[in-house]
Amino acid sequence: MANDAALRTSLVWLAVVMVVVGIWTLSFKKVIVTYVLGVLGIAGVLLPDRDYFDRDYSRWFSLVSEQDKLALAQRSGFRWWLFISEVKGFG
């Protein structure tokens, strides 16, 4: 992961949310559900290798070649967000 500080910050905020949920609801189950959903959310946003997944689906099972690295370095980093914003219902 390129940004360890973002991961650390996210985990600290998750811990704060877990404490608040635990104090507010007095439910250990809800704290565990908060933890699981928070870790999955953090993993889905911060951990994926965007360069690896920003290729054709058929090439996900092969390693990133030097040509792929050069091509990905020349592209804009906003391609993923443009795709998401064009999904029906968001834009």
Image: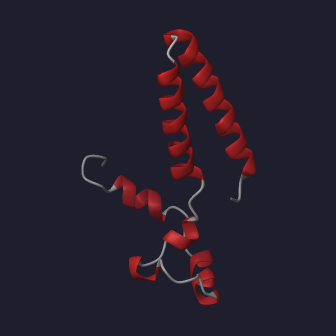
Counting from the top left corner in percent of width and height, residue 18 is at 58, 24
Q: Is residue 52 left or right of residue 12?
A: left
Residue farthest toward the front in the current orientation of the protein: 28
Residue 65 location (% of width, % of height): 60, 87
Query: In this picture, is 11 found above or below 87?
Result: above
Q: Nearer the viewer, residue 31 or 90?
A: 31
Query: Would residue 16 be found to the left or right of residue 43 on screen?
Result: right
Report the coloring of the rendering: secondary structure
Near-viewer residue (20 or 69): 20
Q: Quadrant of residue 23?
A: top right
Tally the marks: 0
Q: Which x, y percent locates residue 15?
A: 65, 28
Above-or-below relation of 67 to 19? below
Residue drawn 25% across the image and 46% down it: 89
At a point 74% along the width and 50% down the height, the residue shown is 4
Residue at (55, 74) in percent of width and height: 75
Where is residue 54 drawn, in percent x and y? 49, 71
The outermost residue toward the left is: 88
Residue 1 lies in quadrant: bottom right
Q: Is residue 15 left or right of residue 22?
A: right
22 w.r.t. 85: above or below: above
- Among all residues in the image, which is located at the extreme right? 5
